[in-house]
Image: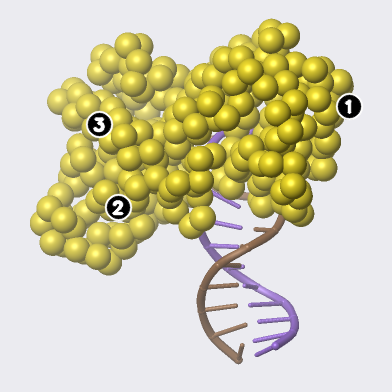
Chain colours: A yellow, B brown, C purple
Amino acid sequence: MPELPEVETYVRELRPRLAGKRVTAGHVYWPRIIAQPEPALFLERIQGRRFDTFRRRGKYMLLGLDSGDSLIVHLRMTGAVRIHPASIAADKHTHLVLDLDSGERFHYRDPRKFGRIWLTADTAPVLHKLGPEPLGPDFTPAGFGQRLSGRRASIKALLLDQTILAGVGNIYADEALFLARIDPRRPGGELSAAEVDALHGAVRAVLQAGIEQRGSSLQDYAPPGGEKGSFQEKHQVFRRTGQPCFHCGAPIQRTVLAQRSTHFCPACQK
DNA sequence: ATAAGGCCCTGACCGC
DNA sequence: TGCGGTCAGGGCCTTA
């Protein structure tokens, strides 16, 4: 489940593998993966274009082309991008292949087919609903508190809401709430100013630590370089149900909030 | 406006 | 071994 640290790692590792390379041809094997424009036009517009800029916004990768278009990629749950030698064949889960002038190929592979890819000169319609970047200057305790005020949904659900904050997913939400010692079940609007402040700091801290570890590698997830991230070794609560809390020893508890597995220490998080 | 639930998908896992 | 059933989960859509 790629979240902000995993997507950031993705962009960093794709840059040296893609920069300056030109698309010579392409093939779409599962049309629904292409959100915009329709696949035939998508291939027509990307052909002959060269990758030149590499950015991230929330969990979206923005791969800029010399035409002014951006290839926007959202990996959702199981999406993966690889730059393979042409000798590696597309398997049944590979839904988009772009031939590159380097002799390599860009593969988009996604067993669950949840990911989406856009090709557009105007990224705003795709991204405009996103809240602030958690590691950027626009994410402030005051603004965060304002977005939470009056909300009755659980703070866990609100952390997953990309319009409040862009880039946090299930792993980093649980980890941030543990670091801030806040019970994930509490209504977001009921957090005190001090708690909002602590959570703001905790979100930044876990995301920054995640980036430094090159993300969390669960199941067979790995960034495009192939070397797995290691933040999963630092998880305090995520998928540690029944195991002792590293802080107090109480068993980590699992519940479901916003239809998502939620892990927390019932003793530490109030 | 907010909250909650369904949907898309398929590999992994479970019980028989 | 095989098979049916259940689960996971990000973002979007519908419903209340």
Counting other residues with Cα less than 10 Å from the Cα at mark 3, is it few (<14), some (14-19), or many (20 or more)?
some
The chain identifier of the residue carrying mark 1 reads A
- Asked whether the beta carbons under mark 2 and mark 1 sit within 8 Å of each other, the answer is no
Q: Quick check: do tags 2 and 1 share a chain?
A: yes
Q: Position of residue A192 (x, y in %)?
A: 19, 27
Q: In the picture, residue A253 is in which quadrant?
A: bottom left
The single residue placed furthest to the right in the displayed view is: A40
| Earlier residue among tags 3 and 1 | 1
The chain identifier of the residue carrying mark 2 reads A
| Circle 1 SS class | helix
Q: Position of residue A5 (x, y in %)?
A: 40, 34
Say whether residue A161 is visible.
Answer: no
Residue denoted by label 1: A40
Q: Which mark is residue A175?
A: none
Q: Could you tell me how far apart the alpha carbons at marks 3 and 1 are, in whole angstroms? A: 43 Å
Q: Position of residue A254 (x, y in %)?
A: 34, 58
Task: Tell me which amino acid carries mark 1.
Answer: Ala
| Circle 3 SS class | helix
Q: Which mark is residue A233?
A: 2
Please name the residue shown 22% across and 27% down the image: A201
Q: Nearer the viewer, residue A21 or A229?
A: A21
Q: Position of residue A245 (x, y in %)?
A: 18, 58
Q: Could you tell me how far apart the alpha carbons at marks 2 and 1 are, in whole angstroms? A: 43 Å
Counting other residues with Cα less than 10 Å from the Cα at mark 1, is it few (<14), some (14-19), or many (20 or more)?
few
| Circle 2 SS class | helix
Q: Which mark is residue A205?
A: 3
The chain identifier of the residue carrying mark 3 reads A
The quarter of the rendered structure image containing the C terminus of chain A is: top left
Task: Tell me which amino acid carries mark 3.
Answer: Ala
Say whether residue A9 is visible.
Answer: yes
